[in-house]
Amino acid sequence: MTDGTTRPVHVTGWGRYAPASVLTNADLERMVDTSDEWIRTRTGIRERRVAAAHETTASMGAVAGLRAIRTAGIEPDDIDLILLATLTPDYWMPSTAALVKEAIGNTRAPAMDVAAACSGFVYAYASAHAYIASGMAKHALVIGAELLTRFLDYTDRNTCILFGDGAGAVVLSAGDGPGGGLGFEMTTEPQGAYMIWLPAGGAKAPPSAETIARGEHYIRMEGKETYRFATRTLASTALTSIDRAGLRPDDIDLFIPHQANIRIIDAVAKGLDLPMERMYVNVDRYGNTSAASVPIALAEAVNEGRVKVGDHVCLVAFGAGFTSGAVTLQWTADPARGIAGDAAVRPEDVQVRLPVDWDSVDPIPAALAEVLARPVAPGVEVPLDDVAPGEPEHAHPEPVGR
Ligand code: COA
């Protein structure tokens, strides 16, 4: 990796989307042998979002993507590259990016998916930067979107408590002024290939009654090994990208780490010898949304006023593969634009075209559907709207969850 400064590439748009339905730790207590206390102290997670039956990775990605385009103040057809990072595509083919392209009303851009698990958004960001820096594209839409709750075994307490659904996106644009992406690092360590994996459904184990009976269509994870990898790698990956940007860790105003576990984020802060205030945290509200986690966190951090023009920001992620990646950038966009961009796109106005001759089965796992149908327990606060921090409350009078 080099610093890739052939021409400056800036974040000009950002957006996020979180489905309305909330799965709390108390809900999970009803499904597996766990406790709110265990989940909070071991992971920092209080709740996560669950996509409704009519929602898909493409539909969530399209809403976040269109919001990023509105924030950038450009038209969908100004986009000339679409990269969508996901480990939960709608289909094996076509790519989820292709469906998003149609849903947002773009006619020009090549669209493709990026598979690098939870590091996927950072990998896609770095790839889009390279396209723009080299002159092959001018405006790229980079999306991280995941619908993980349909790939979880709700009898496995090691995994089902961790993950949630959502999408985030940025528009990257060629610019003349200084700033934008300054330093990049990406690593892949295949020794960790089977530490987080989904065994069946691919060419090695095509889906069959037998693979389903064995539960091989669900995510499996060696939590301790993954934890070790994350705490060993995140700080060093961030450091390399910061170094390539010609900066020191103390120059970074805000880190946007992958939101997997508050203890992992804490370890990164310690590894970089920085206070936790420099780390953006929203894992408590979303759990781990894999490739969507960094762009959701970035959009929320900017909309909350945590990022100002001229600030240095470091995005850093790790995930299955094992992969890791970091981008150090200097923020140049007016942070106030994001809230209006989010408000400009209502989820119900974005449609992903369905096939004409095919009926899907009910996509929500039965155990999850049963718990979500519950009456809300007294005293539990369930945010039932899709309102980003700072967004005017009237922005989405009829939120998702139809
Ligand atoms: N509720 C209650 N107890 C649980 C539990 C749950 N949801 N999950 C595991 N336990 C139990 C274990 O069975 C174990 O019990 P035992 O001591 O009787 O065997 C005990 O809690 C401790 O388990 P352990 O695995 O040592 O916990 P941990 O402190 O390592 O935390 C993770 C587990 C998964 C939270 C942690 O390892 C982690 O975050 N790993 C990284 C995962 C990750 O980030 N994945 C995504 C990568 S992108």
Image (spheres, rainbow, N blue to C red):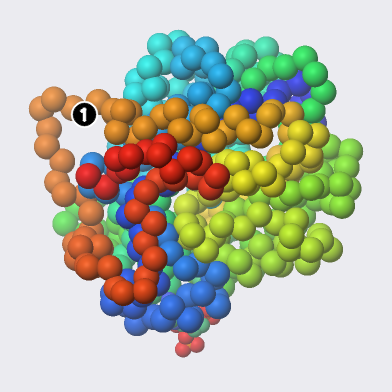
Q: Above or below — where is 236 with respect to 130?
A: below
User: Looking at the image, which is closer to me, 390 or 126?
Assistant: 390
**Snapshot quadrant of residue 4:** top right
Left or right: 261 as drawn, with respect to 202: right
Residue 359, percent across and down?
A: 11, 37
For the point 38% across and 27% down, the residue is 100
Q: Quadrant of the C terminus?
A: top left
User: Looking at the image, which is closer to me, 188 or 251?
Assistant: 251
User: Looking at the image, which is closer to me, 117 or 380?
Assistant: 380
The 10 Å Cα crowd at callout 1, few under 14, some 14 to 19, many 20 or more, is: few
Left or right: 8 as drawn, with respect to 45: right
Q: State whether label 1 is within 8 Å of ligand 1.
A: no
Residue 171, percent across and down?
A: 58, 26
Q: Which residue does the numbered mark 1 point to in the structure image?
A: 354
Secondary structure at badge 1 equals loop
Residue 152, percent across and down?
A: 34, 60
For the point 82% across and 23% down, the residue is 178
Work out whether residue 223 can be spotted: no
Label 1 amino acid? Answer: Leu
**Snapshot quadrant of residue 137:** top right
Q: Above or below — where is 204 with respect to 159?
A: above
Residue 303, percent across and down?
A: 60, 41
For the point 51% across and 24% down, the residue is 69
